[in-house]
Image (tube, rainbow, N blue to C red):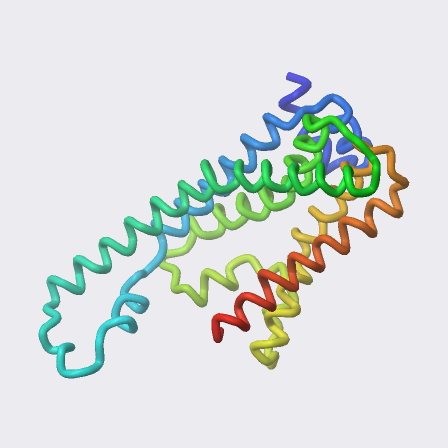
Amino acid sequence: MTSLVQPARVFVDPLGGTRTAVEARRWLWPLLILAFCVAASGIAYALRWDATTSVVSALPTDSTASSVSESDIAEQIQTASRKALVGGIAKGLIVMPLMVLLLACILWVTAWLFNKPAAFGQLMAAAAVALLPIALYHLIYAVCASYQHSLTELRAERLVPSSLALLDGLSPKMQRVLKGADFFNLWSVGLLGVGFSTATGMRLGRSLALVGVLYLMYVGIFFIGLPAGGGQ
């Protein structure tokens, strides 16, 4: 029962709850909660998503467009909805556990580079606990999406506004930059800094600064660099 209550304590007492979870290497329940919430979010989105606009916009506009029948379009819409459902479940049950494992590996390498060895179980706990705010975001998203009659892609992006990228009047480049200024992401960064400090014995301020730098690198690569390189 203590292990089940522990994740909730992180929201009430971030410092004490995170430190206790990391010291006790309690990563299983936070990981299960994360996987469940993300999968629930993906399912809620897929069930409410109106794939018609996306499918129609992807249809050819040249002379071959007339050969696409209404039954073909309906089949493509149904296929897109099924892919969204399967993808949402897979993201929660497969991608998120792998992400926690990858994050723990990055923390282990970072601890090794700074000569601050730590048990891998503690680093797993730090990674899993740090992503609990992300689980909370997806839980809120799942509830909000389930109350919608239908969702377009644009509506889905703005359903739970949490980053400065949703401000009006921003250029595409500035939107990519401000996407990193996300409340739940920054909350996770703070918890990760506390967890890394607990696992390695590094001073809290230094640990927070180090994790902050890692997050800036993540934002630079995945929010700015890759989208810009892909011409988005």
- Percent across and percent down for residue 58 are 28, 71
The quarter holding residue 54 reads: bottom left
- Percent across and percent down for residue 222 are 58, 61
- Name the side, left or right, on which 118 lies relative to 99: right
> Eyeballing the image, is 25 above or below 126?
above
- Percent across and percent down for residue 120 are 69, 28
- Name the side, left or right, on which 120 lies relative to 176: right
> Eyeballing the image, is 183 above or below 191?
below
Who's the residue at 71% across and 37% down the image? Answer: 108
Who's the residue at 76% across and 56% down the image? Answer: 213
Image quarter (top left, top right, bottom left or bottom right) of the N terminus: top right
Q: How many marks?
A: 0
Q: Nearer the viewer, residue 32 or 9?
A: 32
- Name the side, left or right, on which 79 lies relative to 230: left
Q: Nearer the viewer, residue 229 or 65?
A: 229
Who's the residue at 82% across and 48% down the image? Answer: 208
- Percent across and percent down for residue 37 are 51, 39
Q: Nearer the viewer, residue 12 or 88?
A: 88
Residue lying furthest top = 1
> Eyeballing the image, is 219 above or below 169?
above
- Name the side, left or right, on which 201 lies relative to 178: right
Who's the residue at 59% across and 27% down the image? Answer: 29
